[in-house]
Amino acid sequence: MGLELDYLEGQSALTEEEKEGLKIKSISTHEELDEFEQKNIEMAHEWLLGKKITLDSLLSVEFIKELHHRMFGDVWLWAGTFRRSGKNIGKVDWTQIPIEIKKLIEDCNYWVSHKIFSDEEIAVRLSHRLVWIHPFPNGNGRHSRLMADIMMERIFNKPHFTWSGKDLRSDNEMRDEYLAALHEADDGSFARLINFVK
């Protein structure tokens, strides 16, 4: 029996080839997958505790990939590897991902060094742009939110975001609000998303 996944709005569907990258072949439902991924994400948090992080190390292709691998590498063979397929929600063609990630790193460094936005807005813009680029086959939302939280805690020495204190992987009103805020940010308005993360 193969992996059968039901996708919520705003989740990227995996190709059959990407599904074949599942390391734990006994997983057959989305609930089981979520459980194993959550355990892996908790291990990534433990890894972060002992890691020295600077702005240069955080805003690097290597760290972006490594964090995703640490979050999902026990579950997926392709964890930490940029996607090589089109997605229903990624705004960037997969061939352009390395270029767009490089632009994001340059932009984010500029925002920080020139204090273009508040600390909160910089972290929110980092998270939003990572979701917009959608660099990985799956797990982009969780990865982008953790990147923003690391920036808040390790770079700005402020508390991480609450993300409205809800599970954004479940079909609920908070997820709907999060997606609506992301769509407004796609159009250049970040106020709703900044309000949401606090």
Image (cartoon, rainbow, N blue to C red):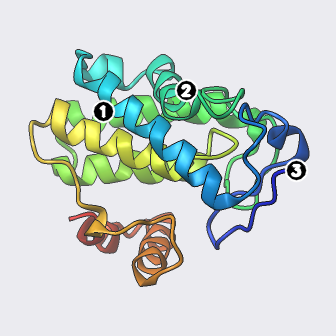
Mark 3, Cα crowd under 10 Å, few <14 / some 14-19 / many 20+, is few
Quadrant for the C terminus in the image: bottom left
- Give the x, y percent position of residue 5: 76, 61
Residue drawn where x is 51% and y is 71% of the image: 170
Which image quadrant for residue 96? top right
Q: What residue is rendered at 17% in x and 38% in y? A: 153
Q: Are marks 3 and 2 in contact (CB under 8 Å)?
A: no
Q: CA distance from mark 1 to mark 2?
A: 27 Å
Side of 4 relative to 74 (left or right): right
The answer to whether 98 is drawn above or below residue 162 in the figure is: above
Residue at 76%, 42% (x, y): give it: 26
Q: Which callout, 1 or 3, points at the residue further toward the start of the chain?
A: 3
- Disc 2: CA contacts within 10 A as few (<14), some (14-19) or many (>=20): many
Q: Is residue 135 left or right of residue 187?
A: right
Residue 130 is situated, as x and y percent measured from the top left of the image, at: 50, 45
Q: Which mark is residue 2?
A: 3
Quickly name the residue at label 1.
110
The amino acid type found where label 2 is placed reads His
Find residue 105 and report its image quarter: top left
Residue that mark 2 sits on: 69
Q: Earlier in the sequence, mark 1 or mark 2?
A: 2
The residue closer to the viewer here, 30 or 70, is 30
Tell which circle, 3 or 2, labels the residue nearer the N-terminal end. 3
Say what amino acid the circle numbered 1 marks: Tyr
Label 1 CA crowd tier, 10 Å (few <14, some 14–19, many 20+): few
The kind of residue on which mark 3 rests is Gly
Q: From the viewer's perspective, is the residue at label 1 or at label 2 nearer?
A: 2
Q: Is 92 left or right of 129, judged from the image as shown?
A: right
Residue at the image point whose x is 50% and y is 21% from the top: 66
User: Between tags 3 and 2, which lies in front?
Assistant: 3
- SS of the residue at dot 1? helix
